[in-house]
Image (cartoon, rainbow, N blue to C red):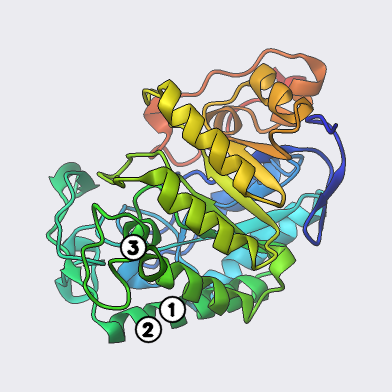
């Protein structure tokens, strides 16, 4: 069995270890243009010793934005800055995938072009708050997407995938988790449509299938992954029968021959009961390929997941925020830096690029 330090292959990509950097929203991009800041190059290059880096969630179009200072991948300026970042990571021997994102209803008209309502499968307002102008505000009432808007969004995923390839990424991840747009279509709490994109499991998965196929028109299957969160309730999301629903979805995803499935098994602070764990175990067994586990793992639980054969790699979030050399620290048995929670989403270089490496403490 592999362990955290085993080399191997992730689809078409050779990896130096199984310690992956999770996608982490850090709110350092330029808010008016969604272009990553110059600091992002340093931030990602510092973490190039990860077996693979997943970028922060990156919106595919202007409608996909729901948070301040998150980056995009829909203009030439975005492509240019991301190309600088991928070249910096590759120069250090690292591998990096871009996570393609649309927030759907987890937004506010403040972020939307012309102050429009956010897009969603159904006009159901989420019980969440968003942050802008220095304060939290309730998310706006979304509007149900028309068929034309759905088709346009699929094309925006295709263009974003093409832009990511031009920017030099090693692959892309389709973000269908955590209560954002694609997850909203998958779940019956948020998808109450009565057309070909709602109702049955086949219909609720139609958008994810069509987005996946659009991305696969640009990338080879072994350079594309999907992220799911079947038992998560983040962003006011839920499903009446997650085991049945996600068994269907995962079995369909198996047919595409993708590089991996990235599963959010639990969130920090989220209560996970035995029923949830049983669902998670069953769903993991449905997946036939490379499995990336995520969910509040530490060194020991991650190593156990690897050695038992449960996972093929594990993504770490907060630990990678505070420890740019996390893989080396794990291998050396070194103490980890503690994360500064106050700078997760603010602070420029503070709490972003100024965490010390082992040999600089």
**Foreground tag (3 vs 2):** 3
Q: In the figure, residue 12 lies in which quadrant?
A: bottom right
Quick check: 18 left or right of 196?
Answer: right
Q: Is residue 4 above or below residue 58?
A: above
Tell me the number on the disc at residue 154.
1
Residue 304: x, y in percent? 71, 22
Residue nearest the observer in this picture, 275 or 33: 275
Q: Which residue is mark 3?
A: 185
Answer above or below: position of 137 versus 144.
above
Q: Position of residue 74 (x, y in %)?
A: 47, 75
The residue located at (42%, 66%) in the rendering is 205
Residue at the image position 45 percent from the left and 83 percent from the top: 155
Q: State the quadrant of the N terminus.
A: top right
Sequence-first disc among 3 and 2: 2
Q: CA distance from mark 3 to mark 2?
A: 14 Å
Sequence-wise, the earlier of marks 3 and 1 is 1
**Where's residue 327, x and y in %?**
75, 30
Look at the image and tell me whether residue 265 can be seen.
Answer: no
Q: Is residue 165 visible?
A: yes
The numbered mark at residue 268 is none
Tell me the residue that label 2 is attached to: 151
* The one of 246 and 306 positioned closer to us in this rendering: 246
Tag 3: Cα neighbours inside 10 Å, few (<14), some, or many (≥20)?
Answer: many
The residue drawn where x is 13% and y is 47% is: 138
Residue at image position (71%, 47%) is 52
Q: Is residue 290 left or right of residue 6?
A: left
Residue 6 lies, in percent from the top left, at 86, 35
Taking the image as shown, residue 39 lies to the left or right of residue 46, namely: left
Q: Are marks 1 and 2 in contact (CB under 8 Å)?
A: yes
Tell which of 212 and 75 is nearer to you.
Answer: 212
């Amino acid at each position: 069995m592999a362990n955290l330090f085993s080399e191997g292959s992730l689809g078409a990509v050779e990896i130096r270890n199984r310690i992956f950097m999770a996608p982490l929203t850090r709110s350092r991009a330029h808010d008016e243009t969604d272009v990553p800041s110059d600091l992002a190059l340093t931030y990602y290059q510092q973490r190039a010793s990860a077996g693979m880096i997943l970028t922060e969630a990156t919106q595919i179009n202007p409608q996909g934005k729901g948070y301040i200072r998150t980056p995009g991948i829909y203009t030439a300026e975005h492509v240019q800055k991301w190309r600088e970042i991928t070249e910096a990571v590759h120069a250090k021997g690292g591998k990096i995938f871009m996570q393609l994102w649309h927030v759907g209803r987890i937004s506010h008209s403040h972020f939307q072009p012309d102050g429009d309502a956010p897009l969603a499968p159904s006009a159901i307002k989420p019980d969440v708050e968003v942050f802008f102008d220095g304060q939290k505000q309730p998310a706006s009432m979304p509007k149900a997407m028309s068929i034309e808007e759905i088709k346009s969004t699929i094309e925006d995923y295709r263009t974003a995938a093409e832009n990511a390839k031009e920017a030099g990424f090693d692959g892309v991840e389709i973000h269908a988790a955590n209560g954002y747009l694609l997850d909203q279509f998958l779940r019956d709490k948020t998808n109450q449509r009565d057309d070909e994109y709602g109702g049955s499991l086949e219909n609720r998965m139609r958008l994810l299938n069509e987005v996946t196929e659009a991305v696969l028109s640009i990338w080879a299957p072994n350079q594309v992954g999907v992220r799911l969160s079947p038992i998560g309730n983040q962003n006011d999301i839920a499903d009446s029968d997650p085991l049945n629903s996600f068994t269907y979805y995962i079995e369909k995803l198996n047919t595409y021959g993708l590089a991996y499935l990235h599963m959010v098994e639990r969130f920090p602070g989220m209560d996970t009961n035995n029923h949830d764990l049983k669902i998670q175990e069953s769903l993991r067994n449905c997946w036939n390929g490379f499995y990336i586990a995520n969910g509040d793992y530490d060194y020991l639980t991650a190593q156990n997941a690897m050695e038992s054969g449960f996972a093929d790699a594990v993504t770490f979030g907060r630990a990678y925020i505070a420890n740019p050399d996390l893989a080396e620290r794990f291998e050396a048995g070194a103490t980890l830096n503690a994360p500064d929670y106050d700078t997760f989403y603010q602070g420029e270089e503070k709490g972003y690029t100024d965490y010390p490496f082992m040999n600089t403490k």
